[in-house]
């Protein structure tokens, strides 16, 4: 049989959510995944926010392979030898309903795929979708790399991530340029749970999410992260691809320098490298709802550009889940009228808004532009570290007032008062 109600390209959080919801509604669904198993090709930082998945699978944390509930959030500005941090810990985050968990995608995606299969979805792994099949302008199926690999459906869901076939083939929106994406590189380090707890001041199964700007990426727009799993650490950096290519630096060298930073090494020194992973992240700021669907096709998750980076955290997996729910709901409604044309699917943006995905993307549409500002990654982290140094050092001679300290720290950083005010305004516009 090669005809389905829906074909879903990609077994990541977006595709598996769409498959699960449709299968629960009794639809014939097939998920096509190029990897050997779901999650084998996937990586993220990895914090999974519970909202969304908890609505779909109540108390998923009792069954899913989550690592630790995140109780401690630390944001640090780094210069070459110092750090200035905001440290927030909340005991409530370690109780149901949890806010967020650290997760390892290879385990989590496999588990999530099993939930979709148990609901009745068919999963075909090691299957690469190479092209779409059209009837006039409408997508009516896909061509896969398998022998006799043509499959047909009422609707195809592009849930194939950042470098989506739908964009590469120009079906929904333009192909990506290096300016639209960041590159993430990450290592998974094995470390005993007690050593993790000691290094990150945690007790029991509490988790921590650390993010860093400044020297973490040596001034390149982006940041560094460390997330604590049960007995592993996820450590990595994310850098804007266009800025990285101008420096000629290799991402793996930047990650190594980050690990060797005097503020980072003591945290991870007991870790042993188990895996190295790299992946792209779309920049987000998607606002054109027209580029999310065409006749017979919907784009979800990263394929739709649904990531939100607000500088101190990346959200993507939860948006992928919510957009997968919106895509499934769109398909269920279109099934009633048997209309899978562009007009029939045009309720999708409204549903995305109701599920909070487009509403968030629209609200933070100026964030990507604000986060391009190079001063955020060099001048400001150095400034706060230098002011902190002046505050905490006792030098011979008369003491300086805070105004003098700030003035001195601003020297040589091209940080005029006008620029600071302009940046505060841009930050307010982008993130408030
Ligand atoms: C370094 C980094 C850190 C991140 N940190 C976080 C974080 O902490 N929290 C968070 O919420 N988000 C984070 N994100 C973002 C998050 O990973 C993504 O937004 C999320 O994975 C998107 O899910 P998706 O299902 O749309 O796509 P993906 O997870 O990319 O899944 C797409 C699937 O499609 C498959 N596929 C692709 N092409 C084809 C094809 N032609 N045929 C068949 N199969 C195909 C792939 O193998 C993959 O399984 C991070 C991303 C990166 C790179």
Image (tube, helix red, strand yellow):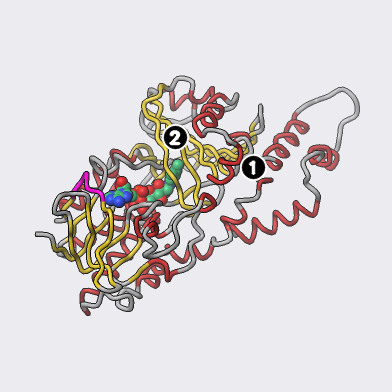
Which stretch is magenta? 124-128
Image quarter of residue 333: bottom left
Estimate the x, y position of residue 95 in percent, counting from the top left. 38, 44
x, y (%) of residue 97? 36, 50
**Outermost left residue:** 1
User: What residue do we see at 36% from left, 26% from top?
Assistant: 274
Viewer-closest of 137 and 85? 137
Q: Is residue 216 above or below residue 306?
A: above
* Magenta stretch contains residue 38: no
Which element type, helix, strand or loop, lies under badge 2? strand
**Percent position of residue 324, x then y:** 32, 60
Residue 127 belongs to the span the image colors magenta: yes
Query: CB at mark 2 closer than 8 A to ligand 1?
Result: yes
Residue that mark 2 sits on: 186
**Contact, CB < 8 Å: mark 1 with mark 2?**
no
Circle 1 crowding by C-alpha within 10 Å: few under 14, some 14–19, many from 20: many
Q: In terms of depth relative to the viewer, which is nearer, 237 or 191? A: 237
- Location of mark 1 (residue): 377
Q: CA distance from mark 1 to mark 2?
A: 20 Å
At x 49%, y 31%, the residue is 252
Residue found at the far right of this picture: 398
Q: Residue at x 45, y 20 (%)?
A: 270
The disc placed on residue 43 is none
Question: Along the polypeptide, which appears first: circle 1 or circle 2?
Answer: 2
Quarter of the figure with the C terminus: bottom right
Q: What kind of element bears circle 1?
A: loop
Taken as a whole, is the magenta stretch helix, strand or loop?
Answer: loop
**Vertical side of 148 occupied by 194: above or below:** above
Specify whether 409 is left or right of 30.
right
The residue that appears at 24% across and 64% down in the rendered structure is 133
Residue 365 falls in which quadrant of the image? bottom right
């Amino acid at each position: 049989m090669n005809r389905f109600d829906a074909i879903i390209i990609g077994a990541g959080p977006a595709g598996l959510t769409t498959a699960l919801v449709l299968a629960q509604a009794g639809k014939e669904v097939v998920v096509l995944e190029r990897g050997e198993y779901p999650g084998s090709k996937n990586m993220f930082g990895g914090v999974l926010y519970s909202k969304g998945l908890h609505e779909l699978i109540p108390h998923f944390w009792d069954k899913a392979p989550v690592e630790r509930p995140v109780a401690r959030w630390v944001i640090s500005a780094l210069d070459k030898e110092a750090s200035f941090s905001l440290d927030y810990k909340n005991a409530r985050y370690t109780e149901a309903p949890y806010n967020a968990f650290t997760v390892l995608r290879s385990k989590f995606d496999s588990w999530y795929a099993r939930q979709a299969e148990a609901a009745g979805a068919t999963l075909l792994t090691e299957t690469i979708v190479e092209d779409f099949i059209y009837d006039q302008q409408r997508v009516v199926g896909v061509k896969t790399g398998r022998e006799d690999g043509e499959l047909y459906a009422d609707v195809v869901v592009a849930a194939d991530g950042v470098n989506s076939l739908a964009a590469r083939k120009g079906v929904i929106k333009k192909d990506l340029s290096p300016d639209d994406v960041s590159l993430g590189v990450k290592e998974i380090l094995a470390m005993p749970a007690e050593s993790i707890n000691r290094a990150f001041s945690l007790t029991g199964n509490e988790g921590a999410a650390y993010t860093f700007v400044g020297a973490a990426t040596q001034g390149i727009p982006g940041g560094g992260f460390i997330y604590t799993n049960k007995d592993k650490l996820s450590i990595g950096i994310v850098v804007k691809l266009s800025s990285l290519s101008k420096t000629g630096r290799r991402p793996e060298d930047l990650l190594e320098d980050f690990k060797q930073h005097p503020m980072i090494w003591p945290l991870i020194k007991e870790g042993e490298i188990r895996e190295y992973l790299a992946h792209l992240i779309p920049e987000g700021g998607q606002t054109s709802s027209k580029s999310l669907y065409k006749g017979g096709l919907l784009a979800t998750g990263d394929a739709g550009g649904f990531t939100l980076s607000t500088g101190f955290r990346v959200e993507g997996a939860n948006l992928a889940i919510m957009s997968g729910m919106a895509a499934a709901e769109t398909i269920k409604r279109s099934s009633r009228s048997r209309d899978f044309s562009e007009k029939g699917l045009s309720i999708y943006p409204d549903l995305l808004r109701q599920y909070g995905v487009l509403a968030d993307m629209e609200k933070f549409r100026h964030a990507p532009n604000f986060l391009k500002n190079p001063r955020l990654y060099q001048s400001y982290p150095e400034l706060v570290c230098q002011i902190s140094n002046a505050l905490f050092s006792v030098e011979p001679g008369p003491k300086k007032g805070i105004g003098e300290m700030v003035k001195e720290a601003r020297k040589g950083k091209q940080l005029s008062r006008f620029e600071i005010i302009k940046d505060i305004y841009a930050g307010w516009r982008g993130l408030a």
